Structure formats: C-alpha cells, structure tokens
Amino acid sequence: MVARVFITGASSGIGEALAREYRRRHPQALLGLSARRPDELARVAVAVGGPVLSLPADVADRAALADAAQRFLAQAGPPEVVVANAGISAGTRGGEPGDAEVVERILRVNVVGLVDTFAPFLPAMRAAGTGRLVGIASVAGVRGLPGAGGYSASKAAVIAYLESLRVELRGSGLSVVTIAPGFIRTPMTASNRYPMPFLTEVDAFAARAVDAIAAGRAFAVLPWQMAWVARLLRMMPPALFDRAFARAPRKARP
C-alpha cells in the first residue's frame, strides 16, 4: 500500500492524471502535488480529494522546489514515490534567432528540474532504505527529431541521467523508473498539427504508468505500440533515419 507520493507538474496533463490514479488506487495516501500555477494546482487538489498537500513551486526555481520538498518531508516524512513529471516543449530550428534561449529553458525545466526534484528527497529516502524515483521521459528522447532538437535533447538527457542514477542507487533499497510516453492527449500535444500515431488518452496512460511504477520497471515505453516504434528508431542506421525523417512535420516554434 502506497502511503506518500510527491508529483511535480501536477496542475494538468500527465501529472494531474497520475494524481487521480494514485488517489483511485490508494484512497488514504497523502499526495504532495506541486506545480507553478497555484490556482490550477488548487483545482486539482480539490478534485482528487483525500489527504493532499498543495505545494506550488516552479521546477526551474531550485530554492522554491527545495522548500516544497522540505515542507512535504516535515509534514509527512519520506515519500514512497517521487514523480518528476514537470516538463515543457517547443519547436526549435537550429540557428534560428531566439532558439538558444528556448533550448536553454527546455533543458532547465526538463533536465535540471528533474535533478532538483529528486535531490531534496534522496537523503531521507536513502535513510529509509526504500522508495521509487520516477522520471517522465519521452519517446522523443530515443532519436533527435527534426524541429524538436531542444525537446529531444532534454528527454535523451533525462533517459541517460535516470539510467546513471538507477545504477548508482543499486543496493540502496531505492529504485529508479523511467517512463517514456508516446503521444498522450494533454495540453502539451493539443497544439500539434500533425498525425500522432497511437495517441493515448491521458487517464489510460496514467493507469499503465502506475502499473509500471508499482512493478519497479527500469524503463517503460507507453503505450506498448510505441515501444516497438522506439526499438525500430534505435536500430535505424543514420542514413536511413535521415531520409525517413527529412520531411517529417515540425512542431511550431514559439
């Protein structure tokens, strides 16, 4: 029985759906929900009901995120599950004016924000000798997608970082779970103006993700159809990949 869960990016999309799923499975669990939009976070906290700590913080603000984590630890103790879910996406084109700043922001939120989410909890979780650290990556991190260099780079970094952390924590009692979503119906994908194969409803994704977390899977691509796509992408030689994706649709630039 899971008793304590902390989730970032909980004010919408995948984070909100994960909060609902954990509440459905564990009605008495204390959910620590964090996001940068206090009003939306309050809405989610009311909607999920039950024991909830609403902890507004932007993952790009290290001090605010650490304060949110310390408030959770002070009131609840070490969480059994920490989900670093907060993330952003934007289209980029190499060398376009302003794109360096966009890429920097994506990396700050998606990569450094994930590291900063785990860091305040690790000492207490190590001392407890149990817990799961969960990072939300993406199939986009498997290969560099045209028009999404910043996002693909960030998710590739997330996958590599979580793998390193998993090995470092081996034998500590803690486990690291990497969840790599395909296309999930959320506000982030709502702006995509191109076909999204195997588009999955967010609640269905959340149920499968919590299953993977409970099982302690090291790496899970969801839905399962996208796992085969990811394997195919990994195996494609560069020349074939370049030809196949040269005309792929691009995400709109901000």
Image (spheres, grey):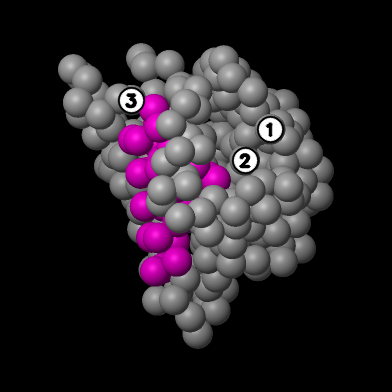
Query: Which secondary structure class fits the magenta region best?
Result: helix
Q: Quadrant of the C terminus?
A: top left
Q: Does 140 lie within the magenta span?
A: yes
Q: In the image, what residue occupies the spot 75% across and 56% down? A: 211
Residue under circle 3?
A: 92
Question: Taking 211 as reference, is 90 left or right?
Answer: left
* Pointer 1 or 2: first along the chain: 2
Badge 3: how crowded within 10 Å, few (<14), some, or many (20+)? many
Residue under circle 2?
A: 182
Q: Secondary structure at mark 3?
A: loop
Question: Taking 194 as reference, is 66 left or right?
Answer: left
Q: In the image, what residue occupies the spot 53% across and 45% down? A: 138
Residue nearest the viewer, comparing 183 with 128: 183
Q: Quadrant of the N terminus?
A: bottom right
Residue under circle 1?
A: 197
Separation of marks 1 and 3 at Cα, in angstroms = 21 Å
Give, as a single range, the part of the protein colored magenta: 138-165
Q: Secondary structure at mark 1?
A: loop
Name the kind of residue labelled 1 in the image: Pro
Badge 1: how crowded within 10 Å, few (<14), some, or many (20+)? few
Q: In the image, what residue occupies the spot 47% across and 71% down? A: 166
In percent of width and height, residue 74 lies at: 46, 54
